[in-house]
Amino acid sequence: MTLITALFLLLCIVVGYGITGFVSLELRLEERLPIAVVVGSMVVTLTSLATIALVGFSGAAVVIGLLLALAVSVFGWRRLPNTPRVDGTDFVRRLRQSGSARDNPWPLLVLVSLCWPLTIRIMSLAYQTGPNGAVQAGHLSVFGDWQAHLAYGSAFAQRDGLDLTTPLASGEDFAYHFGVDLFAALTVPTGIDMPAGLTVTTGFLALAIPPILYMFGARLFERRSIAALGPLIFLGAGGLGFFRFFDDVRAGGWGVLWRQSQDYTRDFDTLWMDNPVLGHLYAQRPTMIGFPALLVVLTLVWRAVDRRTILAAGVLTGLLPIFHTFSWGTALLLGSFWVVLRRRQDALWFVVPAVALAAPVVAWLVPPSPSGTFRWHWAWVSDGAPWDIAWFWAWNTGLFPVLFVMGLTWRAAVRRELAIAIAPIWLWWVGVHLALPHPWPGNNAKYAIFWWMLGAFVVAAVLVELVREATQKKSATSSITLGFVVIIFVSLIASGSLDILAAVDGSGGAYPATTMSGGEVLVGEWAQSTADDAVFVSTPDSTSQPVSALGGRQVVSASSGWVYDLGLNWLERAEDSKAMLRGDAGTEELVAKYGVDFVVVGPGELRAGANVSYWDAAATLVYDLSGVRVYEVDQERS
Amino acid sequence: MRTLAVLIPLNTPKQRRRLMGWTVIALVAFGLVLRLYELGDRALHHDESLDAWFSQRYVEGTYQGYDPVYHGPLRFYVTAGFYWLFGTGVGSARMISVVSGTLLIGMPWFLRKRLGNAGVLVVALILAISPSFLYFSRFAREDAFFVLLTMVFIVVLFAHIDHPREATLIGLFLALVAMWSVKESVFIVVLVVGSFLLVEFASQLWEQAGRRRMDSYAVVAWGLLGIAAFLFALQGTVTDSMVFHMAWWGGSMLVFVGYAWYLSAKVSKSPATTRLGGSVTKPGVDGWSSAVAIAIFSFMAIFTLFFTEWQGTNTPSTESNSVIDGLVGGWKYWQSQQEVNRGGQPATYYLFIIPAYEYLTIGLALFGARRVWVHSTLFGRFALYTSIISIAAYSYAGERMPWLILHPMLPLLLLAGLGAQDLWDHRHRALAKGSAVVFVAALVLTLAASFQVNYVDPENPREMLTQAGQATDDLADTVDRLYVIDRLFQGEMGRSPKIVIDSELSWPYVFYVRNLNNVLWQSLDTAVPADADVVIVASDNRQGVAEGVPLFKAVEQNHREWWVAGGGGTADYFGGGIAGWWNWMVSRETWANDGGYDGVGGVSETVFVSPQVAEMELRANDLGVGE
């Protein structure tokens, strides 16, 4: 990261800080700053998108976008009730109070002092330079999902104009909530490359998430203990997979703690939910904006004292789809329910912008044949009988569902109005058992995660109340109760913590793993010099496709799994790509069909059966370095 | 829009203190930016690469413990922590100095009652922008870290003297242990601060005895006596009698203390009723026991790698016990090095390098000395005494290096802060107004010098802050080139290139090429391996290698560069005279000796690449990749 990058991110915070002035809610420094990170990133991304559309992608466009965002934020700065200096002084004053004072933020400081070093460490391992100049991924999230995000970001950063065709399947619309990847691309003109841009922006947003989780807990549940415990339960969540760890210990000793050979929250056999940090936040980058923005919206709706705040929540919701469509849907539905539940006269001030601003984007995001991917399906990935469903959730989330229900019905833990407000999130949980909206069934976890996130605070409330009652009664059973609470808490976070430990340690298992060889990195760099709309053919069997990942160029078919998940004709594209690589009969027609300009023949393509002799004769060799060849197709000739 | 007066209210001391506080915070932020800007751009110095290397070994679990040759282990642990957070690299190797140098900027705040508001701001400003503090806050050695710990020690010391209690006593001991586990300069700190405390204790006993209050003249006289003792001990310069010198000097202090104690006892006054005496007795046995116990535990934890390594490193400069090595190994080794005088700098070295870069501080320190003379306070006497004795001590010590400038600079800066406050207090006087103009001019020149040495040409050997081990830009470029070659070769040949590096050139290459697979280190005064793809050889051995690989393409470059003033074996800073120094100050021109040699030399190296590698590089260049 360069100093210019840091300045860019700092200015995003400045933008966001000012934007919070549009909200009448009296926010504290430790709330305003993380909200500023998220909201500022969103606003800068949107204004930059507008300037890129007008003048193309460049450093100047980013600067103009930033200046526009700053201009917008000025109006908010003028409305701020206090200067940052006053807020800072107030923060210090509250910190100096007694630890038991209600607004002493020390629990938040403990939370972030635990989360932030782990975040920075995980980010420092995301991309590594391996032997021979290879780019290595430090975690499955990077090896898999981030390669797609790299392509999305490069599609902006390495093209001069705004071209909303996806790099993963030539000729198709982007149709993806690419906002966070565009935000990463905006850092490239500051002097870093795209992998660094992904890492830096992920880290930047990740640092804001624990404080926003804390804010949500503090504002809704009004207890610091719940505000601190809720994030831990969510971020460390996993199911009962930790029992497998004990099997591993029996086999290999306690040293396996540092040499984990398996994941304990995901195997896509019996474990599908994955840990929220590793499987949802780290891997699926849109959630880095979606989740905290959702929590901000809900907090604003819950605590709004006037129409201005409700409108701000509605606008923030309306801007979400390009960043994270799932969070938009949750914010819209739950937020609408909440404004009605609280009998707000200004409910439409939330609903109208939330729908109106979002509608065009949502329409554009809908895949070409949604009916082809959506299907009714009972019980998600479990066998269907009630016992199977119960066992599935127990295995995937432990005692979480039971505690969640308990919290919603225990008035001492969660007051009635709040319980009624949060209860509808169970519909998301029910929904995953009724339908498969996406090609890959695992994507249902993207709906259940909201149930997990909001429920974490309810579960925290239950644990806190149990502790409170036990410590007040001071009876013989109190110690037993406290012991149970500790065991329950540990069981809720053990599996997730083990997986996070593996990600932090970075030296066990299959990672770091090479995601792009040195030669592939070089061809990716070269691809940046080709025309913006150049179309490449490369192997669909690999997530390592440097011409899209680093070059931002379209490929006929990226990794088949990604294309499949986008609801596109993945099989046809994959087979056509391989046919072209092999030089099968009909290659010329396929080249014309997809408008292919270049054919890549590297180690991956050779494994897919690429025919070098055919392309030596049929096209012009324009790149030959470090084990990778690229042929330029003469389309007229073909 | 609110008025400026409302924005920056200065009516009450609380408001002024708050403004000062925010200004210090702003200076800290500014200093952080200065330290981070292009942090990884300058090539690693020889010593930096060693520090970086040992820290990496700690991460890998192969670091065996304290070896006084490479100084204390604490900083390897801290740097390893930065590696863990940010990954291993040049920037993260320097982070310990960045963080230390940045925190140091904020430390004067804790001495605000002694320095005054103006003093705090000026000291913080100088710490932020000073050429030497900025340079070595971007330099992966332990000096910035050590100076931060020294400052912490000073702050806690005065907090303890003001209000003696167990917590501050523990803080003092922990600071001492931390300093001990970073660098052997702790012995100099103990000597300088300890001798001051003895002198001060004696003066308090003297005053308690009803004698005429020992005024500033007497304090200076005793200080001069101390220096005279040093100078006397220096005669003959039999450096293996360093212990004798220290004993002589310390003994004279103790005699003075003893006499003052006697006088005090004669009037039935207990030493405990003096301010310093009280700071010793008030924590009580419990306080001292806790402090000592915590210090022992911390010391053992650090030197035994947190109780995992008891046997020590077993090198020529260590015993076979980690704790013993920590306790006496450092002293023994550095005592033995006094004769060696690595670097070949004369005893007057600091009298040149400090004014060369820190004239702003010196000028303000003169005003500070005057203030102490006129209005003597404990802190003022401390700053004056430790400034003079530190310069003397470091001049006496047998190894004089540019990074050691920070150590005598620290008390000098405190004295400068007092000077700044003095000028501010008398700001209505003509002298103060005139001095302010000079101050601003000196500040501008300091900024220019700082910018030059830190950003424009940080490897310039003509800068006194750079030292003989400083690698050149050429070396850094070669490292980048090696990684590109590695990337190209692997793809073309399916293996890593064989890179042979002359063992004379080991550092900093060892750290830089840590991620390359096939690197061979050997002395290249004999044959070159036949299957080498890249050879990097020192200039001494170039001819032999060139004959061994006639088809290789060669590029000659500088590995390290340095300047020895006067062009001789030992630097001669008098040789240039005033004109020479003026030229140096203005344009960094150096003066030549009678033979015309201006003392700028270096180690050069030649990078040989095979025809195969050369062809790959050419192709990559044509395609515009791999740069």
Image (cartoon, rainbow, N blue to C red):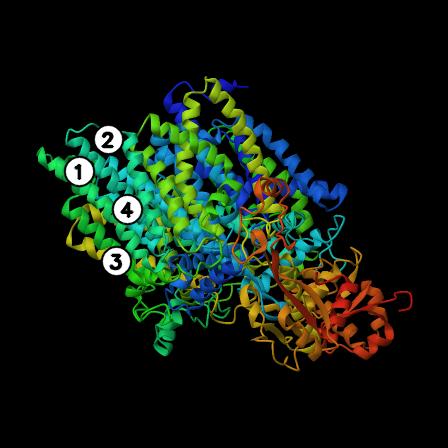
Badge 1 is on which residue? Answer: B260
In front of the other: B563 or B222? B222
User: Which of pointers 3 and 2 lies earlier in the amino acid sequence?
Assistant: 2
Q: Secondary structure at mark 4?
A: helix
Instruction: Name the subunit of mark 3.
Output: B
Q: CA distance from mark 3 to mark 2?
A: 40 Å
Label 4 or label 3, whichever lies nearer to me, is 4
Q: Residue B610 at x, y = what percent?
A: 71, 75
Label 3 or label 1, whichever lies nearer to me, is 1
Instruction: Name the subunit of mark 4.
Output: B
Badge 4 is on which residue? Answer: B172
Badge 2 is on which residue? Answer: B214
Label 3 or label 2, whichever lies nearer to me, is 2
User: Which of pointers 2 and 4 lies earlier in the amino acid sequence?
Assistant: 4
User: Which of pointers 4 and 1 lies earlier in the amino acid sequence?
Assistant: 4
- Please give the name of the residue rendered at 65% of the width and 41% of the height, measured from the top-left corner: A46
Residue B11 disc label:
none
Q: Sort mark 1 into few (<14), some (14-19) or many (20+) by Cα contacts within 10 Å.
A: many
Q: CA distance from mark 3 to mark 1?
A: 36 Å
Badge 3 is on which residue? Answer: B297
- Please give the name of the residue rendered at 45% of the width and 38% of the height, measured from the top-left corner: A31
Q: CA distance from mark 4 to mark 1?
A: 26 Å
Q: Is residue B274 above or below residue B175?
A: above
User: Which of pointers 1 and 2 lies earlier in the amino acid sequence?
Assistant: 2
Instruction: Name the subunit of mark 1.
Output: B
Q: Kindly identify the amino acid type of the residue bearing the numbered disc 3.
A: Phe
Instruction: Name the subunit of mark 2.
Output: B
Side of B559 where B314 appears, left or right:
left
